[in-house]
Amino acid sequence: DVEALVASATESHTAFAPFRKRIVEFRGHDFEAFLQANLGRNVSQVKITAVDGYQVSLNDIEGRGWMLVTHEDGQPLELRTHGPLRLIQTDIGRRDPKNMSLFDDWIWMIERIEAVD
């Protein structure tokens, strides 16, 4: 339930957002902890479906610093701000945040997340 996720978002991360071209305060959930809390087990692969029907599988989740974003600059995400949910990495390593092509794995407009066994 997106409303519950928005209401319970406690994690915060401030970073340069390549698609906004400015510093943004993200709020949401640590993705690994979210999966553990909701599935009761560690998950190594998920299938993510976006509002427009786009689907992608995400592997090797553990230790990659994924954040399930519900808010941007204090406001809940909407479709026009690429919501209702977004997945970003909080640790971008040596990637240049001003080079948008290096952030192809950030996933926007998430509608559904499913564990793949």
Image: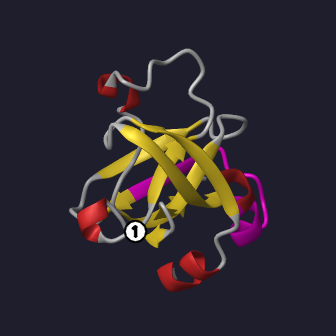
Residue at position x 54%, y 55% from top? 26
Q: Which colour scheme is used?
A: secondary structure
Is disc 1 surrounded by few (<14), some (14 to 19) or many (20+) residues within 10 Å?
Answer: many
Residue at position x 31%, y 40% from top? 19
Badge 1 marks a residue whose secondary structure is loop
On the image, the x and y values in percent for residue 3 come to 51, 84
Stretch in magenta: 34-48
Q: Does the magenta stretch include residue 45?
A: yes
Residue at position x 33%, y 37% from top? 21
Q: Is residue 39 magenta?
A: yes
Q: Does 16 sit above or below residue 32?
A: above
On the image, the x and y values in percent for residue 22 come to 39, 40
Whether residue 112 is visible to the viewer of this picture, yes or no, is yes
Residue found farthest to the top = 94
Answer with the quarter of the image where residue 77 lies.
bottom left
Report the front residue among 17 and 110.
Answer: 17
Whether residue 115 is visible to the viewer of this picture, yes or no, is no
On the image, the x and y values in percent for residue 93 come to 60, 21
Kind of residue at disc 1: Leu
Answer with the quarter of the image where residue 78 lies.
bottom left
Q: Return the residue at label 1.
A: 77
Residue at position x 37%, y 35% from top? 18
Q: Is residue 17 left or right of residue 114?
A: left
On the image, the x and y values in percent for residue 102 come to 38, 23
